[in-house]
Image: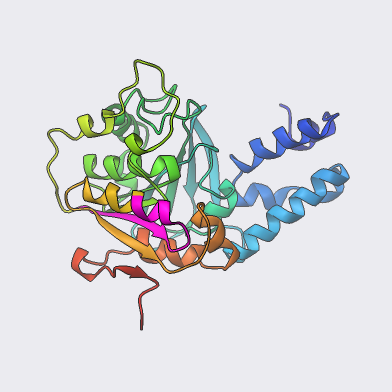
Amino acid sequence: MTTLPDRFAACRTAADFYRVQIDAENLLSPAEVEALEPAGLPPQAAAWLGKLRGMLMLAGGGAQAFRRRDLSDNATFYEGEGEGSPRCLVVAFTGIAMRMNVPAPAFLQALPAASCDVVILRDPGRAAFLAGVPGYAADLPALAARLAADLPGGRHPGGIRCIGTSAGGAAALYLGRLVRARRAVSVDGAHPAALKLRLPDEVDRGALDAALARTPPGPEVLVAAHGIGDLRDAVRGRLLAAGLPGARALTVAVQGPHGLFGTLLARRLLGRFLAEVLLADTPPDGLPATWPAAT
């Protein structure tokens, strides 16, 4: 089996290093990052590892204990260890860069492994999950069924939570309604009809809406969050919420560009955001219009 140090050792160009780094950032768990030995890496890779570990420190001290296994090429399961509050399943939809705005280990580090399992989904076709998760599920109903089969709910008495960033935001809200998630959150997201996507002719921009044709609003809480620093994200987020009955917009009072999680991570706020907006069970009428809420 080829290890990450072996892959780095085989690199001959800057592009080689970049590809290996991106692959690692999109897959590794926090514990896997901590287990890497800088002394066993080429200087460029050791410097990269130092930066990645710095991101973990910004997300929270002490590596969160997630164990990684692949469900498919584009669906990765991170099983949390430890005993916390009733365990939930977090289903995460990445953007076009195949990540949650930040590297996977930094995102996972901001979640409590003692009470969360996480599935990170990728759409290499960059179709905003309109055609499901390539190689895993053909559409949202198939994805709901596949997750239920692969990850039986008995391990997750805390229910399902969905979250998506950018081009994955709408899919998170729509799956959240389909599976009656406790909470579903779009961050910097927009309806696929509002995105500049290069789609094959057979891909329908209304596929997410069609998936919910017979699914009326239920007890799930749907939130479309956007930062105050990007007017386009604000407009798209509010339109996304307005087009999905029962959804609500949330303004994040943190100044920054598109890619809100990167700004929250840099300010050591990512864990707090996920705890209060994704993992909390605040009643719908108790959600503020702006986060963090004024005290």
Magenta stretch encompasses residue 251: no
* Residue closer to the observer: 225 or 212: 225
Could you say where residue 176 lies in the image, as x and y percent from the top left?
A: 27, 45
Most extreme residue toward the top, as rendered? 202
- Residue 38 location in percent, x, y? 82, 50
Q: Is residue 123 left or right of residue 171?
A: right
What residue is shown at x 33% (from left), y 64% (from top)? 280
Residue at screen point 51% across, 56% down: 261
| Quadrant in the rendering for residue 12 | top right
The x, y position of residue 129, in whole percent, is: 38, 31
Q: Nearer the viewer, residue 205 or 121?
A: 205
Which of the 4 image quarters holds residue 56? bottom right
Q: Is residue 282 left or right of residue 165?
A: left
Q: Could you tell me if residue 85 is visible in this image?
A: no
For the C terminus, the quadrant is bottom left
Residue closer to the observer: 136 or 265:
265
Q: Position of residue 89 (x, y in %)?
A: 37, 48
81 shown above or below 171 = below
Q: Is residue 36 visible?
A: yes
Quarter of the figure with the N terminus: top right
Residue placed furthest toward the bottom: 295
Query: What residue span does the magenta drawing correspond to?
Result: 220-235
Q: Residue at position x 56%, y 46% from top?
A: 104
Comparing 24 with 205, the one in front is 205
Q: Quadrant of residue 234?
A: bottom left
In the image, residue 225 above or below residue 122: below
Residue at point 53%, 56% (across, down): 257
